[in-house]
Image (cartoon, rainbow, N blue to C red):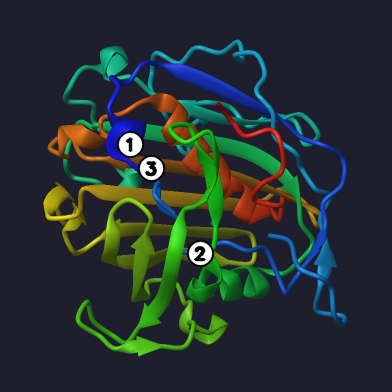
Amino acid sequence: MSLSDFGLEIQQEMIIMRTKNELPWFRDALTISALLLILPAGYAAQGSDHFQLLPRGLQAGQPIDTDLRSGPQPPCGKEIVPPYPSLDDLAIVKSWSKSEFGRDWKPPACTGWAEVGFTTLVTTAARFRHISETGGLLRHIGAISELAGMRYWSTTHKQWQTLIVDAYALTDSPVGQRRKDFTSDEMKEGKVLYFEQVDNLAGKAIYRMHIVEASPSRVVFEVENVSTMRYYFTPILHPGELQSMYFLDRESDKVWRYYSIVRTGKKANGLIAGNEFSSVNRAVAFYRYLVGVPATQEPPGAR
C-alpha cells in the first residue's frame, strides 16, 4: 500500500450505503474491537450463545438531506449529526472537510478530545439488528486478535487488500507483553487497556482503549495511538494524533444504534491528508467488521 491513498486534498463527501435484508450468523456477540480509522465478520453459529443478524451489503447512494453546517455530533444528549438512518435503510459514512469548519474545529465536549482541528474526520451512523446481551458485545470489543486479516478496498491498487496484518492484547501498560485477548470481566466501565496492531500502511503501533461506559443499554469506548506511527522511517502520526470513539445504544430488544467518529489531528503528516475515498473505505471496513458483513462483499464504499 502506498501513501498515494492519502495524497489528495480532503473534500467533503457523503457516502450512503444501502443494506440488504439478511445478516449471517456470527460468533458469541457483535464483533467490534480496537476500531481505528486504520483498523472492526461473519462466523458460523455454534450453540445457544450465538445469534443471527441480517447481512447488510453496502453500496454508494445519494447524499442525505440534512443540515451539516453544525458539524458532527455524537449521541451525547443532543440530536446527532448526521442522523441515524431507518433500520432497513442506509448506513451513512461521511468524510468531513476542513473548509466546513476551519482549521480549529472544536470536537464535541463528550469526546473529551482537548486538541482542536483535524486532518481527516470521518463519521458513521447506522441502525442494525442485534439480539446479544452487552456481555457478548464486550467480549468482542476485547477480542483484539480477531482483527488480524481484516480487509478493505484500496483505491490506489483497485483491489481488496489486508488492512490489519496482526493484532494482539498487551499486559497492563504501553510497554506490556503480548497476552491473550481481553475477557468480558476485564471490559469494565472506566477500564484502560492496551493493545498492539500491525497496519498495512503504518506498521506496528501501540494503542490505548478506554471503556467510557458499559451498561445493559449503552457501550461507549475510545481508542488512540500511544506510540508514533511511521511509514518506513517517516513519522506520520505522533502519540494521540489518531483518535476514535464509538457509541452503541440499545434501541429495543433486537435493534441497536451505532455512531463512530474518527479523526487524525491537525498536526498529522501531510502525507495522510488524503482523499476521502480511502478514508471512507476504511470506515466501511470497520462497519462491516462490526455487523458481520463479509469484508470483501461487493461493492466497496467507494472506488
Element carrying mark 1: loop
Vertical placement of residue 113 versus 59, above or below: below
Vertical placement of residue 283 versus 244, above or below: above
At a point 64% along the width and 60% down the height, the residue shown is: 217
Q: Earlier in the sequence, mark 2 or mark 1?
A: 2
At a point 30% along the width and 65% down the height, the residue shown is: 207
Is 209 left or right of 175, judged from the image as shown? Answer: right
Report which residue position mark 3 lands on: 262
Report the front residue among 76 and 222: 222
User: Residue 241 at x, y = what percent?
Assistant: 21, 48
Element carrying mark 2: loop
Report which residue position mark 1 lands on: 108
Report the front residue among 76 and 182: 182
Report the front residue among 155 and 237: 155
Report which residue position mark 2 lands on: 33
Q: How much space separates mark 2 and mark 3, taking CA atoms?
A: 14 Å
Disc 2 residue type (three-letter):
Ser
Label 3 or label 1, whichever lies nearer to me, is 3
Q: How much space separates mark 3 and mark 1, taking CA atoms?
A: 12 Å
Q: Earlier in the sequence, mark 3 or mark 1?
A: 1
Disc 3 residue type (three-letter):
Val
Disc 1 residue type (three-letter):
Pro
Element carrying mark 3: strand
Q: How much space separates mark 2 and mark 1, taking CA atoms?
A: 23 Å
Can residue 112 be seen?
no
Q: Quadrant of the C terminus?
A: top right
Q: Residues within 10 Å of mark 1 (few under 14, many from 20)?
A: some
Q: On the image, which quarter does residue 104 sit in? A: top left
Is 139 left or right of 81, judged from the image as shown? Answer: right
User: Residue 61 at x, y = what percent?
Assistant: 67, 19
Q: Residues within 10 Å of mark 2 (few under 14, many from 20)?
A: many
At a point 71% along the width and 69% down the height, the residue shown is: 133
